[in-house]
Every structure is written in C-alpha cells, then in structure tokens.
Image (tube, rainbow, N blue to C red):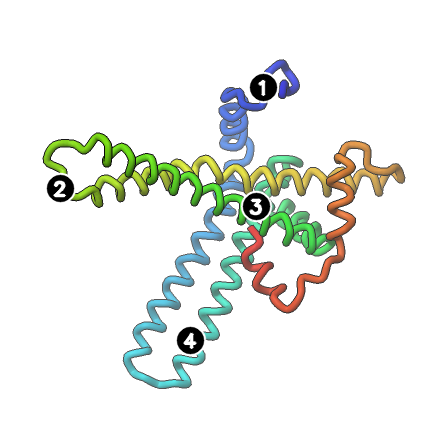
Amino acid sequence: KIAEGGRSCCDCTLSIKAFCHGLTRHAGSLAFGAFAVALCRVLQLFLWWAKKKDEVVGNPVTQCIWRIVNCLADCFTRFVEFVSEHAYVEVALRGLGFCAAARKSLSMAALSPGMFGLVGNVACAVRVLGVLSVVAGTEYVGCIILWWFPPEGLAYPTAPLIVVGVAAFIVAEVMMHPISAAARAALHCYAIDEEEAQNSGVGSNRAPQSLVWLAEDNRHVDLGADAHRRWCCSR
C-alpha cells in the first residue's frame, strides 16, 4: 500500500524517520517508561532474592508473607508494562508526554476492557504461534540439510540444531514483535476515531465496518472468572 508522500508502508525510510523522530522529540518519554519497567523488575528480583534467603529459616508464616508480596510485585510489574506499552502508542499517535499518554491509555482501557483484553490475547497468541512456526520450520529444514548433507567430522547434530534454533527464535521474535505493536496501534486508532465521532456527534467514518462490529460485540464482554489473569497477560 502506498502511504502519504508516495512511499510504501514497507519503505525502510519511514521506519528510520520514525526512529529518529522518537529519539529527538520523545526521548524523555521513552526513557521514563523504560526506567519504570526496569525499576519494577529490579524490585521484583530483590524480593525474590529475599524470599529465597528467608526460605532457609523455614518459617511458614514468613514464607506465606513473601509469596503474597511477590505476587503483588509481579502484578504491579505487569501493570506497569501494560501501561507503558499502551502509553508509547499514545505518545506516537498524539505526541503527548509519557504521564499524559499513560492517563489516556488507562482511561481507554477502563472504558473498553473487553476490547483491550481481546486484542492483547489475540496478538499474544498470534505472536507465539508465529514464533513456534518459524522455529519449528527452521529446525525441520536444518534437520533435512544435516541428514542429506552431513559435514565431515560431525558426530552428533545436536549442537548445530541448537544454534539454528536459537538463531531462528531471535529472527522470529524480531519478525513477530511488530504484530503486537500494530494491534495496539490499531486499537488506539479506533478509540481515537470513536472519541472524535462522539465529540462531533457524527458516526465513525474511518474505522472499517467489520472492526466496528467487533468492538460493539466485545465492548462490555464479561471476561469471566479468570478476568484478573487475562488482564495481567493482555499484552
């Protein structure tokens, strides 16, 4: 598809321009979000170390308290990651600062929890299936090559296949990671379009009709008994 300016969506100059724009215009927002996630990770690691140290004592009350604290820390870390990921989308679309973008993202998630949970889970499933498919296919091709064209002096193919699998996993992650980002961006674009339609009093005229139907069907969906688990993993 040809984008505005005569460039295709796969043109690398668009990615380079966006990368430079993010570093020059929103470096503080990027650094703040990364710092928040890293700080939560460090605190979580410290709590895990303290729990392991206290397990030597064998006090069941202390172990129970540490498990509760670790569970809360893990939930808070996932929450910060969720907010950061969606705040980055708002920074890219609206040009807001990180805190304002985080507030906007939280308000969107509160108004449409079903859509955010659905998009997050579907994007995660597609990403996992894509990575597994790439790794499995690469390993299969590697096995065929080693079977039909075995190199001299190779007694066991285990080591080459491990290297092939690791390389395939890295490439698959690089290939499939934009899927999650694109899904979040599309969700935020729909939310922005809906917000503008409500403010103007005119129905949405940009979103595809199929997307509008999907949003209406999942706007107030009940996530069920495992809603807390879906929210923690919806990214």
Q: Nearer the viewer, mark 1 or mark 2?
A: 2
The residue that mark 3 highlights is 123
Instruction: Specify the amino acid type for callout 1.
Output: Ser
User: Contact, CB < 8 Å: mark 3 with mark 4?
Assistant: no
The residue that mark 2 highlights is 155
Label 3, label 4: how many angstroms apart (C-alpha)? Answer: 33 Å
Q: What element carries label 3?
A: helix
Q: Is mark 2 on a helix, strand or loop?
A: loop
Q: Position of residue 210 (x, y in %)?
A: 75, 39
Which quadrant of the rendered structure holds the N terminus? Answer: top right
Q: Which of marks 2 and 4 is nearer the N terminus?
A: 4
Position of 167 with respect to 150 (left or right) is right
Label 4, label 1: how many angstroms apart (C-alpha)? Answer: 53 Å
Q: How crowded is mark 4: few (under 14 residues within 10 Å), some or many (20 or more)?
A: some
Label 2, label 4: how many angstroms apart (C-alpha)? Answer: 48 Å
Q: What element carries label 1?
A: loop
Instruction: Specify the amino acid type for callout 3.
Output: Ala
Label 2, label 3: how many angstroms apart (C-alpha)? Answer: 41 Å
The residue that mark 4 highlights is 66
The residue that mark 1 highlights is 8
Q: Residue furthest top?
A: 6
Q: Which residue is drawn at 16% across and 32% down?
A: 151
